[in-house]
Amino acid sequence: MAGYTTYIDLIRPLIAGKQIVSTAMKKEVDRVSAALDLALAGTACAIVSSGDPGVYAMAGLVLEMCRERDIVIAADGNGEDSNRLLIEVVPGIPALCAGASLLGAPLTHDFAAVSLSDLLTPWEVIQARLEAAATADFVIVIYNPKSRRRADHLTRAQQIILKHRGPDTPVGVVTGAMRDNQRVSLTRLGDLHEAEVDMQTTVFIGNSSTFNYDGFMVTPRGYAGKYDIKKS
Amino acid sequence: MAGYTTYIDLIRPLIAGKQIVSTAMKKEVDRVSAALDLALAGTACAIVSSGDPGVYAMAGLVLEMCRERDIVIAADGNGEDSNRLLIEVVPGIPALCAGASLLGAPLTHDFAAVSLSDLLTPWEVIQARLEAAATADFVIVIYNPKSRRRADHLTRAQQIILKHRGPDTPVGVVTGAMRDNQRVSLTRLGDLHEAEVDMQTTVFIGNSSTFNYDGFMVTPRGYAGKYDIKKS
């Protein structure tokens, strides 16, 4: 059982008696390395992420490191070749779904997820993705809106998107979805620079059809108003 | 309890004894309407979706219909005003996470979800989104790759993306994730027109860094090779 200390603490009652490798944030490589060493020595080992392990999370790094270390792997269930390390990725509810459910239904139409962290991605790439997503009227889900090093990423994203969408575009801001520190708020694109965000925040920027109704953020499914939903 | 017959059948053992409103596909409006009538009459009512109810699913239509019918609503938990209909959206594991977990880790970096269904969205909008997502090197998740009316949507999407990515770009095709009819396959962008897809299929198109390793589809997190993952 390996994981970032915060996540391990969240499930500690469930894993009593297990061997635990818990490491600080930014020690992802050490954590995966320790887990792989255990697994190669014959111990079944789980690596814990919050949300879904495949969305900006650890599943990718595990597989990357298997390749770098020339570890021969197979999907769990294909257990014929016992020389292969069996890997299973167990899906979960990603922050974009948890957050969306607290806001209403902002993701009922096409959306793009963009992380503003420029730790591993050049800012130019991030900027081009924001620009493309804004131009094509995707609902935009922003991960990592604020980093320790830089506080202005979200304001820069806001400026890019404002070139393509009006200041009244609905925006949802969710921090710590489903945790004790949960905070949910609705604002508008023009005011997004004033939103309180931290490293547990996900930001949802509506498309040109998204509306607020009674405190819920909703992206309608149809552009053409095809359904006669009033009469039904 | 209201839902598309297929989904109701999947959970029938869990809902024995409940009143059930089950309708055929494309009868979404009738289904939601019946559920709202029940709820307004004082019966607690659940509407069932597969995957996550907020990703291309029913949560949006419920809220749209509340607005159209002038039903005054509030988030469940804000129960102070008893004249409001209380609505709670319960998140789930969307097909994009279930499918990704079966492929490996294709969504470890920025991605865009695009539905190819032109039932409610003009094809020009869909095309512009595919173009934008391909240009900005998003991993692209395609929902509804095939409709009853038109079989060539996926081939048209393939042609658009091939303008920006090589034919060897890894592509994952997942049908019926986590169900009895589950099928998972890895192919390349140049061969995508030959893939078997149906209305339960989700297609994952890698970005310029996505690779296959031992049958797993992986999008690495870092562009700069910042981690020294070999040595660790």
Image (cartoon, coloured by chain):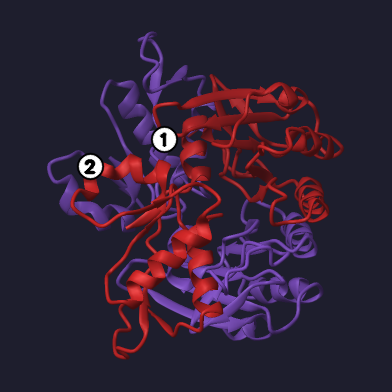
Chain colours: A red, B purple
What amino acid does circle 2 point to? Answer: Pro
- The chain letter for the residue carrying disc 2 is A
Identify the disc placed on residue A69. none
Tell me residue A88's x, y (percent): 37, 70
Q: Does the rendering let one see residue B115?
A: yes
Asked whether B28 or B176 is in front, the reply is B176
Q: Identify the residue position indicated by label 1 in the image.
A: B89
What amino acid does circle 1 point to? Answer: Val
Q: Does the rendering let one see residue B198?
A: no
Say above or below: A17 vs B179.
above
Contact (CB < 8 A) between labels 2 and 1? no
Say above or below: B48 vs B147.
above
Asked whether B228 or A153 is in front, the reply is B228
- In space, the residues marked 2 and 1 are separated at their CA atoms by 27 Å
- Most extreme residue toward the left is B17
Q: Residue at x 43, y 70 (%)?
A: B102
Identify the disc placed on residue A13. 2
